[in-house]
Amino acid sequence: MLSPYLFEAVFNNSPIGHYLLSPTPEATILAVNDAFLKAAERTRAELVGTSLFAAFPHNPDDPTDTGESVLRRSLARVVATSRPDRLPAQRYPIPVVLPNGETGFEERFWTAVSTPIFGADGAILCISHTTIDVTEQVRSEAAVRESEARYRALANATADVVYRMSPDWSQLRQLDGRGYLKDTAAASRYWIDDYIPAEDQERIHQAIAEAIRAKSTFELEHRVRRLDGSVGWTYSRAVPMLDARGEIEEWIGAASDITERKLAEEKLKESDRRKDEFLAMLAHELRNPLAPIGAAAALQQRARPDEGLVRKTSEIIGRQVGHMTALIDDLLDVSRVTRGQVELDEAALDMRAIVADAVEQVMPLARTRHQQLEVDVPAQLMPVMGDAKRLVQILANLLNNAAKYTQEGGRLRIAAAVREGEVAVDVIDNGIGMAPELVARAFDLFAQAERTSDRASGGLGLGLALVRSLVELHGGTVACESAGPGQGSRFTVTLPLLARDAAPAAPRSAAQEMADEASLSIMVVDDNVDAAEMLGLLLEASGHRVSIEHDPLRALERACAEAPQACLLDIGLPGMDGYELARRLRAQPATRHALLVAITGYGQDSDRRLAAEAGFDRHLVKPIDLDALRDALASRPT
């Protein structure tokens, strides 16, 4: 027979909190073991003989504290059923002494089992109540749940794809993210075959093998196949999760969609490549005219050159300067158009006249290349609203391109027609044609067909970009097509058709076209001695009386004394720029009404505004176009 001492020793030394309660509503504590005293931070004298609910009352300030009511119901069930009752983890705050000496409540969680103990007569003698403090376990589980909830929220909120991978990367365990569905069957599939295009699979295998070997982060940019079948680019990064032995348990990774960035990078690379080609081409094209200009100048410096040689070399210089001017004008035009700095001088026009002017410009080139140019325009009026100069520039550019890229003896055709409320102009050739990839980017800056090493076609690849910009400024469209290399090309410009009752601007009369070349007294002011002398010679050859000054202050004094009818002023003068000189000329009576013409290398719209504000009547860009200069002199105030 075991002694009562033994039972008491077992009760008191049990590692599980244990006490005996009376089977009454008060649940008086009859006995309590050391484990519970330690967990509750109480003494046996404080608890024995006291009601459990008096020793551990509920917190009246905590509406969520239901521990006492739950425990009362549990003990009542034991008494009513004579059967044990188990409580899962239950929140039951207990009173404690706070660090400041006041009494408060500390949140605790307990699991409990209440078991009836029967006497010899079969009645419940007491209730054995065992408790385990599971506060840390409950808090840990809550932390895990919160962490999982945050992870899930992050996976759902991120624009990235989040995935889990088996240790050897052979199976995709889970996949969530934008553009994808959670794939619960992914564990049974070989993900590389499903998601990675063939051209990137070897790179993936190599990167994975290195990451597994080093147990390090996997990081790679690669193509990926989306669920809709399209292929994009992704930046994928995964970290290994290690077990207690330091072995890889799985991989957690995220993949960002970088398709737009990769496309932008490719576009930048292509643009950079074409820019480099353009700069090389520009250097070549600008050097080409310099060689004959230099040779012609050297010939004229020889002793007593004959008249025929002078005329021939002058013609060469004129042609080459014109070529260089055209190149620079293209550059400036593209710059102005792309920055939205071109203002159209619009008027009602007849497209037939525009076609005629463009044909007149290209005919010399077509004749030189022995090409047949066919013109097809209707008899009826084709009214459009536009800038005559710019519309001629559009068609002349297309015709020049057609002539340059068509072999000698080839055929060119320009045809205009009215189609569905629009004026359409087709420029067609049977020249070298275009590959599909060139057709797709024909109107991009610096786009140009392949040419022979002698670069006989010339140009900078700016023309079509300028054409598109100018056509769009007129509210129209331009398109190109080609059946392929050697099959010729067709360019089509469409513009809105103007109402039939809108009258196109009347063409200028012959009298208007002829400049009034009556002799004028003209002062040329330019610190570049050679430029001033050459301009003076040209003006004197046209019958004008010319004086030349290189210093703006001397020019101001001389103008006051001689009162020239026109002043041609360089802008970049020393000491006083041309703008200030113009203002002073306007301020003195002798030159208040003189024609002031700005001569400058700057031709932006902002430069023209500055000239107008300073008092200039006209603004000419170097090298000076003689026809433009003649028109400027003819427009002098009367």
Image (cartoon, rainbow, N blue to C red):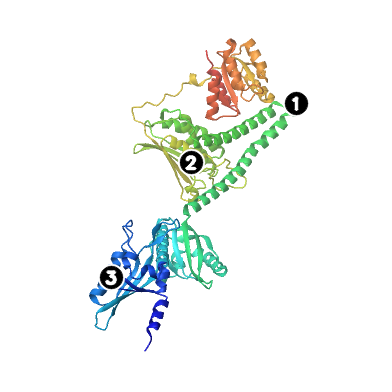
Residue located beneath label 1 in the image: 304
Residues at marks 3 and 2 touching, judged by CB atoms closer than 8 Å: no
Residue located beneath label 2 in the image: 412
Residue 185 percent across, percent down from the top left: 38, 69
Residues at marks 3 and 1 touching, judged by CB atoms closer than 8 Å: no
- On screen, residue 150 versus residue 531, left or right, reads left
- Could one spot residue 301 in this view of the protein? yes
Q: What element carries label 2?
A: strand
Residue in the image at 24% along x and 79% along y: 123
Pick the residue in front: 20 or 364.
Answer: 20
Q: What crowding class fits label 2: few (fewer than 14 Cα within 10 Å), some (14-19), or many (20 or more)?
A: many
Residue in the image at 33% along x and 27% along y: 501
Cα distance, mark 2 to mark 1? 46 Å
Kind of residue indicated by mark 2 = Leu
Residue located beneath label 3 in the image: 74
Kind of residue indicated by mark 1 = Arg
